[in-house]
Amino acid sequence: MKVSVSPGHNIDGTLILPLLEGSECVPESLEAGLHTALKSQINRILSDGDFKAKAKSTMSIIGSEGGKAVMVGLGKEQDADIHAYRKAGAAVVASRKKAHGTDFTARFSGASIEAMGAFVEGMMLRDYSYDHYKLKDDDDDEEKEITVRINCDEAQEKELNTLIQNHVGVVSGVHLSRDLGNCPPNDMYPEAFADRAWEWAKQYDNVNVTIINYDQAVKAGMGGLVAVGMGSARKPCMVIFEMNSESKGRGPMLVGKGITFDTGGISLKPGANMDEMKYDMGGSATVFGTMEALAATGYAGKVTAITCMAENMPSSNAQRPGDVIKTLSGKTIEVLNTDAEGRLVLSDGLWKAGEFDPEYIIDFATLTGACVVALGHEATGLWSNDDDFRTRIHEAGNAVDELAWPMPLLPAFEKEMTDSKIADTRNLGAGRYGGANTAAAFLKQFVPNRGYKKDGEQITWAHMDIAGTYWGAKTNSMVGNGATGVHVRTIYHLITNG
Ligand code: BES
Ligand code: ZN
Ligand code: ZN
């Protein structure tokens, strides 16, 4: 999507009219340049109450004497916050038909700069489809890039333009996360992800990507990553992203689960919907997408990220239920179910994170079906060893309308996960109940103390289980289908706005 901001009154292509519920005619400030016949058509529709401007509703009008318009509802005035504007922008793109063409002009009545920016952000977020594997039809209008011109006051032009340019960078991160997640698993395997990261980093002077390959991982003692990935011909690896590493002081650390396909391994999953397990690298995609959002917007602070990439396959070389593995931390794990593999690769990623002495660590993982049982597709599960930090992440999510819901990190769950007869920890809880919580408690065992000091303070850490929100979230109006790219915006907000 190409977006431009201009204070003129020209209407290019189809006019987008965002309206508050109860509008009975086109606001006077929006009338300039509007075709008279089209204006009376719109006014008739509004005064007859045929379009009520309810939140996210749209109606298109083809002018009898020329001109086209799309009305979009912002809902009631008291509810028309930036989230309503973002959703309205997305609704316009979602409802786009061939007759609208690809050129649009949007005009707002009394909206703040933030609200106009959010509207454009919603349009850009929703303007996404994953069609790399389809034959292209050059004549298809719907495949041409959408152009949007925003009419605003002269005094708003500069600030709005800057805000929109920032949204462009962040949206590129969201779309990258979706691209990675949607990519079919025959083409998205651990080293393919690593190659993409390597290629991507070349465009930014301030970003460096290092790949720890299979042999290096074995040598380093990354027993979790190796055990999960060794059953596949596509070998596991770890990817480290360093942004502005020269910059002084501590920076955030993001860690991602990157299972490019999760069959369950020897503890094989049932066949139904197994294709969805291509999204099991969603945590790593979130991390990579966030790095792109930060890099594209010119963020100058230090940020580091680690993605733990493996394909979980059953084979004669796969790990077995009953195996005991030794992780990078030195702690051993009794593997009671090879389908609980995310926590195994993360055990090494979290431990490795300590080497960078980060301000805090956040991990992202499509970790448990139990989290989907608990929260459905409406919220990400959020755990932390620091209540204030958990609140900060929850608030960052609220600020961008991506819900992350606080969940309990309890000693009883930790006890359940350390209760192995033959190893330091076990990768399976004692029963089915509280499965998302036992998984979080398991991860906590591998969050290092600062400086790896035995009796030191554990690094501030949060865990986000995106099993229900990374894909299949039908109520997420920022996306049509497939991967959502959720939490790139949350973490961008957290890092750049405190
Ligand atoms: N990748 C899955 C979790 C998952 C399942 C995400 C369904 C989204 C939808 C994970 O690796 C897994 O299989 N977890 C098991 C853990 C269990 C064996 C303790 C699960 O949730 O059933
Ligand atoms: Zn699994
Ligand atoms: Zn998994």
Image (cartoon, rainbow, N blue to C red):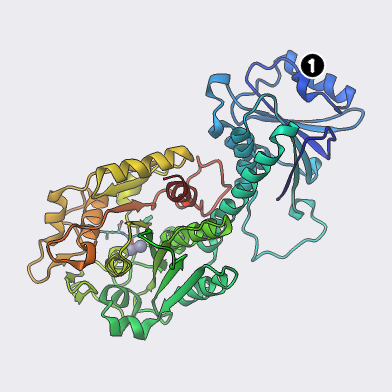
Residue at far front of view: 248
In the image, is residue 479 above or below residue 266? above
Asked whether mark 1 and ligand 1 are closer than 8 Å, the reply comes as no
Q: Residue at x 30, y 79 (%)?
A: 318
Who is closer to the viewer here, 316 or 290?
A: 290
Q: Quadrant of residue 477?
A: top right
Q: What residue is shown with label 1?
A: 44
Q: Residue at x 24, y 75 (%)?
A: 320
Q: Is residue 187 left or right of residue 455?
A: right
In the image, is residue 480 above or below residue 232? above
Q: Is residue 372 left or right of residue 192?
A: left
Q: Quadrant of residue 220?
A: bottom left
Is residue 455 something that shows in the picture? yes
Quarter of the rendered image showing ligand 2: bottom left
Who is closer to the viewer here, 248 or 408?
A: 248
How crowded is the residue under tag 1: few (<14 C-alpha within 10 Å), some, or many (20+)?
some
Q: How many marks?
A: 1
Q: Position of residue 133 (x, y in %)?
A: 64, 66
Residue at far left of view: 421
Q: Is residue 382 left or right of residue 489?
A: left
Q: Quadrant of residue 408?
A: top left
Q: Is residue 334 left or right of residue 282?
A: left
Q: Amino acid at mark 1?
A: Arg
